[in-house]
Image: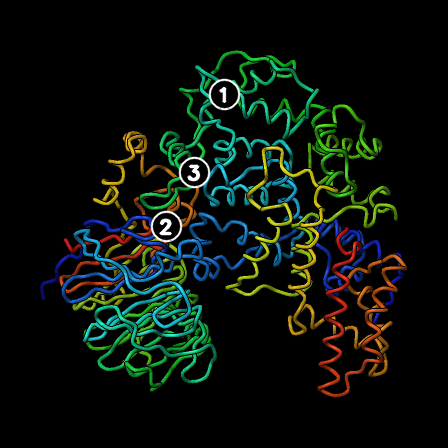
Amino acid sequence: MTTTAFGLRYSTNVGFEADFGGRGFQLPTSIAIRSDGVIYLLSRGKASTAQVVGIQKVTRDHDFLGQFGASGRGLGQMVGATSITLDDDENAYIADESLHRITKFDYDGNPLSMWGEKGSAEGQFDQPSGLLVQGDTILVVDSGNDRVQRYSLDGEFITQWGSLGTGDGEFNHPWGLGQDSSGNVYIADWRNDRIQKFTSEGQHLATFGENGSSEGQLNRPADVAVDPEGNIYVADWGNQRLQVFDSEWNFLDTQRGEAGLNPWAVEYLASQDDERKARESYVPVYEPDTDDPHEISARMEPYLWDPAAVELDEDGRVYVVETGRHRFQIFERI
Amino acid sequence: MTTVHEKQDVALMAHLLRRAGFGATPAEMDRALEIGYDAMLDEMLNPDHPDEIPDDLIRRHHVDQSDLRSAGGPHWVYRLVMTDTPLREKMCLFWHRIFATASTKLIQNKVVTNQINMFRDHGMGSFDDLLLELARDPAMIMWLDNQDNHGSNINENFGREILELFAMGVGNYSEEDIKETARAFTGWSVVNPDYMSIKMRNNTARPWGYMSWQFEFDADDHDDGEKTILGQTGNWNGEDAVRIICEQPATAAFLARHLYHFFVADELPVPQWPHEPPRDPEAIDLLCKAYFEDGHSIKAMLKAMFESDFFKADSARFARIKSPAEMVIGTMRLAGPVEIPSQETYMADAACANMGQGLFRPPSVEGWQGGTEWINTGSYVVRVNFASQILNDPNKDGVRDIIERIKASVGSGSMSSDDLVDACLDILGPLDVLDTTRSGLKNYAAKYGELSWGSDDASAQFDDAAVAIIQLIVTTQEYQTA
């Protein structure tokens, strides 16, 4: 059998810090990619940046195509947006952990419906986060209830699994999830510092990872994606990095991030002469005097800062959303 | 077995917990009385754990407290409310007040949060170590423009303030000492000073947010010539300047007066200190003695102070107006734990600012003076409204505990409204209010008549009465003092 050495290289980044709307993002938490390559980035934002709360549409070539969704509590609005995913018709679904509900938008960004309320019964949520469409159903990671719920695409409850704990099939505040080509589900079991693999019916298959910062170890993994070869991509949020493993959890690669100026940043600096000149002598990466990954990311602008989501496109590109830097970095297979 | 404690012991312990902490819940008071004053003080002075907060949960669910561009206040409020090492946290407030560094200029809260974390690590250690860490602190460097303090062209800001505001006070150094001290700190800067300065000056988070800063010593930019600081001549660097400053009797006296002002009794405004003697010179001498006998230890000064007669005196109790942060945090701790996520921490941060003490936003490098300046008509209304709002729910853990303890304190299933007022005053302090205040509270409570809790309806009415009385008590002058 011939094996191909795995490797990733940084390609580009898309993003810009936006406070009042327009081209850019604000504290993004999740990403979804349409079949035509249009990228949806979910800006969670904050109270003082309400105009940017919503879903920005961009391309990896740095085209900004507008925004849908807004800050608020009504239909189509959001307060604490955590995740976005698309169904086969490319309707968009948004999870909101503050409003404890799921909102569905059509292809054009018009809100269609919403469901959920705070609670622990069927049909209720406590801080919903990761979303994953499987055929005509959608899985919702119900973080505060330490479980996964499955619904129809119209919000009818179907089934659930999971409870608080550290054993197989148990969770501690899970966050994102992904699936392989067989429909097996991989869940970022956030506070247990591990990834759990299940059948689509919720039968536990495997557990990967343990707490730590070495290769193969995880610190609060936020999201997971799986490519057609079965390689597993983990947004290792607490360690501020992307890690990649093969299907047996053998370590393949890690990326800390290396974002340079993208066209939006270049255009901005062209209009800010003093900042542009000061950047000429600026050293973006230097020897830190701390070993705290979060603080290091706060200092080193090229590095991933709070990588909250990882997504793959049909060509194998890897998209990593950085909440702290208001952008996403794209990596390609070597 | 229930232990009955002497009234005087209870009052003294409550005094310690108000001053060295943020007051006590009834459960905290029970435990403190059980171990006694000396053991409690020893525990507060020597916390044996780092007081970790669930930072992962906070950063995940309050994403604006992860990049900390602007939510440093709410972030700190959570820790202040939840900490079980209150004296260490109170010392962070103390140093924030003296080494006042404002995010309004620095344009981000991340680096100020890092500075507060440094206070947590060094705030009760040796003053030499703390002052050296302060001189290396990136937020302080940028706050006082020390990145512009070059060997070839000094900027005196930090050299002046370390002598005037941080360590010695006016009248204890010369203008030449300022210049020479500034020379010792030339080259003490941050990585990428030019770009970081421009981003700060332009108040821009573009293109991708702010960057946290890191200290850097630039030897090429340091003036390594001979300097004379406070009478000592040598080829001094910043470390030497700190050593020389910390050796001065004036430094010990300045620090002692600040500690007295913060923990014991309101002093005159700092600008008057060069012209007026301390309120209690013997107390200052005692603290200075502790400073020099124990390697410039701040903890030794605190220990001497909290063990002193002048601190324990009846006349010292309820003699200080609570700062906004003390009032807000104490009330929130009384109400019960803060959940994550919580909007109450944002509300509390805003309330502190509206009362005149915006955390991370001291009005100037001179910090807050405090004392009677905390109170005016507007700020008093904010105080009362905030406290009433936080204590408005009988099912909050802390409020529930108070109510259940009051019920348990009587043998029968009922009590008079007068007794309820007395019980609430006792458990919220104990608060020794003026007779007119007590009678006013009882007149108000009389509308509830004889109270019981034998049925759901009666219990709900008792809850309502207790909450209403608690809310009224927090409006009193006595509750606003420590």
Q: Are marks 2 and 3 on the same chain?
A: no
Crowdedness of circle 1 by 10 Å Cα count: few (<14), some, many (20+)?
A: many
Q: Are marks 1 and 3 on the same chain?
A: yes
Amino acid type at circle 2 is Asp
Give SS at disc 3.
loop
Give SS at disc 2.
loop
Circle count: 3
Q: Which residue is mark 1?
A: B155
Amino acid type at circle 3 is Trp
Disc 3: host chain:
B
Quadrant of the image occupied by residue A92: bottom left
For the residue pair B425 and B310, the one nearer the viewer reads as B425
A215 vs B441: above or below: above
For the residue pair A191 and B474, the one nearer the viewer reads as B474
| Residues at marks 2 and 3 touching, judged by CB atoms closer than 8 Å | no
* Residue positioned 72% across, 70% down in the render: B467
Its colouring scheme is: rainbow
Give SS at disc 1.
loop
Q: Which residue is mark 2?
A: A19
Q: State the image coordinates of residue B28 (x, y, percent, origin top left).
A: 73, 62
Disc 1 from disc 3: Cα separation: 20 Å
Disc 2: host chain:
A
Q: Which residue is mark 3?
A: B213
